[in-house]
Image: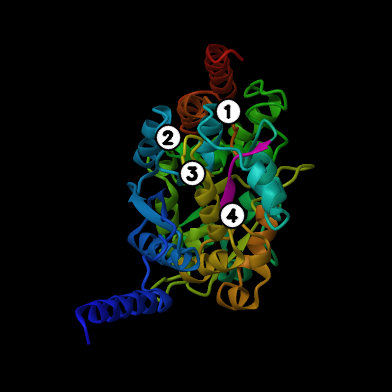
Amino acid sequence: MGRKSRNLLTLAVVVMIIATVTLTGCTTPAPQAEKTTIVFAVGGASNEIDFWHKIIDDFEAKNPNIKVDLLLQPMDTGPRMQTLVTPLSGKESTPDVFLMDVAWIGQFASSNWLAPLDEFVSKDNYDLSVFFQKTLNMADKYNGQLIGLPVYIDAGLLYYRTDLLEKYGFSSPPQTWDELVQIAQKVQEGERASNPNFWGFVWQGKQYEGLICDFLEFIASNGGAILDENGKPVLNSENNIEALTFMSDLINKHKISPPSTYTEMDEEGARLTFQSGNAMFERNWPYAWGTHNAEDSPVKGKVAIAPLPHFPNHESAATLGGWHIGMNAFSENKEAAWEFIKYVESFDAQKDFAMNLGWNPGRQDVYDDPEVVAKAPYLKDLKDVFVNAIPRPMVPYYTQLSNVLQKYVNAAISGKEDPAKALNEAQIEVEKIISQYGG
């Protein structure tokens, strides 16, 4: 074979190899879609953070093109709020998504830090009917726009000792505050024969935010309010003065609540007193149910819950608590952030929160799930309370308003100041605060 023929043969072989490589697919692979990373800011107890990691893992498995970085916040609500205020006031794009205490929403919304969710809801035909509508309308909407969704809900409850109710001849928990005083006085007198540390009713009276939650429940159950429908303060109304006088009387006149109410009594103080067997009634949040019925609890199996009492011719009221999810208005990844919000609010995720953390779901339909009801039967009673829970005022100056009220309400229940005088002075200070905001 001549040189020319060998060269032609070699060329043919090369062409065949190239063709074979091309046909077998050894081409440069098409680039994969890049992952979008969003930052989710959340705080809480260690078991809660562990569970958020699980939620994120489950979400990423279902949404492989979205990565979620968890930004750990402090456990205490004050520092936790500040870790959001700093970046949001600086118009930073992260965190993209975060949880908010219900009391923060007004400030965040009025500062234009929250991205409206209406466009996403409309685009996805997202069903909002599964949520508690009063909570949605009063806490998660601002100026007609949806700016958050409830992840879990809290509301004030009345805990009571079922064994002592029966022992002293009462067939049902009190419906009015006068009935509570009557029952508490009788049980307290009887129990003190063997337990001098026993009290009829424990609640949150220390000078802090918890006192305002209790104050709102007392005044609302007497037809009162902090602000009227036009946003004007009505602190010194007759209904409010009557309710605050009653709060003071619980300690100083009826003497069914300890003097430490206005110096030390917060949620844990009330819980520990009741759980140790030293109280007939307790006002607290739903979290206390689990600890009251723990294996080592002295009152396990002797506790029930009921709506808080009310004044004559009025209805029971419970302050809305809990945490809501919102989207950073300055986020550069709003579509991905919305997908994560939808997952957190999905039936499966909400059920997981209820089953594993004991949280009270933001969705109503989870309360009817057979597995949830079997594990937490008390939830069926909570659902009715949550339907009518009332939020604290959604105003940008709520923190200042609360600080004023804490001072004057605490002074009144301690007996240092007349309730009418205290609320008149609070009214003047709150009016000044509102005027500074152009109200």
Residue 74: percent from left, percent from top = 32, 46
Q: Earlier in the sequence, mark 3 or mark 2?
A: 3
> Which segment did they paint magenta?
145-155
Which is nearer the N-term, disc 4 or disc 2?
A: 4
Reading the image, the residue beneath label 3 is 100
User: Dot 1: what SS?
Assistant: loop
Residue 5 drawn at (x, y percent): 26, 81
Q: Would you place residue 285 above or below residue 420 in this image? A: below
- Separation (CA) of disc 1 from disc 4: 25 Å
Residue, disc 1: 395
Amino acid found under the numbered disc labelled 2:
Gln
Disc ID at residue 207: 2
Task: Point out the tag, 3 or 4, that comes first from the N-terminus.
Answer: 3
Q: Are marks 3 and 1 in contact (CB under 8 Å)?
A: no
21 relative to 66 in the view: left or right: left
Question: Furthest-front residue in view?
Answer: 2
Q: Give the x, y percent position of residue 168.
A: 61, 66
Q: CA distance from mark 2 to mark 1?
A: 21 Å
Q: Amino acid at mark 1?
A: Val
User: Which comes sooner in the sequence, label 1 or label 4?
Assistant: 4
Between circles 3 and 1, the one closer to the viewer is 3
Q: Which residue is mark 4?
A: 157
